[in-house]
Amino acid sequence: MAASTDDTIVFPITASTRAEQHARRYVVDTARSALTLISTILLGAILPALLFVLWWTATERHWIAEQILPPPAFVWDSLKDVLQTGELWGHVKVSAARVGWSLLIGGSIGLILGFGMGLSRTVKAYIFPTFDFLAQLPVLGWIPLLIIFVGIEEPLKVTAVSIAVVVPVALSTLNGIANIPRNLLEVGRIYRFDTLQLITRIVLPAAAPSLFTGLRQGVMQAWLSVVFVELLSSSEGLGFLMAYSRSLSQIDMVIVAMAAIGAVGIVIELVLRLIESRLQGWRRNAF
């Protein structure tokens, strides 16, 4: 019996072949990501488009009086006017500045409380019961008391919004530290990390997702709270613009203020997502 021979020819994979494969894979992945993004945007735009058509139809056919619901074209003209005069940008800057100061103050207090309660059972035993009780109070419930102590000027707005930030930041920090695997903490003890090294090299990277969740919640709570506070007591800001326009029955400006509040909220959300994606890379490198 004749011995069989294998005539199969094996071509070696060269560097150029690998590069071509990686390039094809990159193109395919990019195309899939683009299609997913486009489909998400299109699906998300269906409901706003339907609402806009309903709004336009209702005003065009006079189903609702223009004094109650102005037509889209009138609202668009009002938006262009306040953009050209800079009035809208001025109110946005005032509200954004209040949110920024409140995040700095409330976020710092929340982190200190969260780390204190998370790293020390004694601190948690003393502070958490009182903190848990105060956390149940809505921001608006603090307003009468704050008016007595800080008045009705700018400190009232910043203090009230700071209180709204403290709670989610502190709770998320506490939960993030509490959920750190004990073996990671043991690694720190084995390497004889001091407190600062333990926090920066183990606690922060491990608790980063929870910390950022608290930050996102704090930012959104701050943005919502500043609008509420400005509705009640303010002479500037988007909340004031909405309340003042309503008092003058300028429904077009009320809608403009609502659109600005929503647009700024979306921008904040997109920025936070970008920061979160960058922090994920830092967290992987930290370990």
Image (cartoon, rainbow, N blue to C red):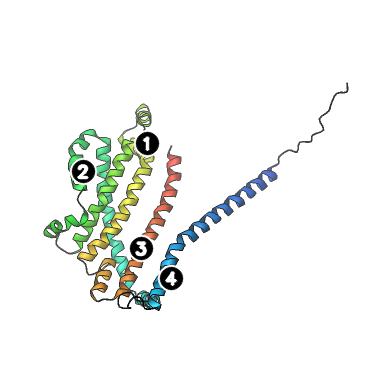
Relative to residue 69, is residue 93 depicted above or below?
above
Q: Single out the mark in the foreground, 4 or 2.
A: 4
Secondary structure beneath dot 1 equals: helix
The residue under label 3 is: 262
Secondary structure beneath dot 4 equals: helix
The single residue placed furthest to the left in the displayed view is: 148
- x, y percent for residue 198: 34, 35
Secondary structure beneath dot 3 equals: helix
Residue occupying image coordinates x 82% and y 33%? 7
For residue 132, the mark is 2
The residue under label 1 is: 202
Q: CA distance from mark 3 to mark 4?
A: 19 Å
Secondary structure beneath dot 2 equals: helix
- x, y percent for residue 66: 33, 78
Q: Single out the mark in the foreground, 4 or 1.
A: 4
N-terminal-most mark, 2 or 3: 2
- x, y percent for residue 92: 32, 66
The single residue placed furthest to the right in the displayed view is: 1
The residue under label 4 is: 53
Q: Taking 264 as reference, is 237 left or right?
A: left
Q: CA distance from mark 2 to mark 1?
A: 27 Å
For the residues bearing labels 2 and 1, Cβ distance under 8 angstroms? no
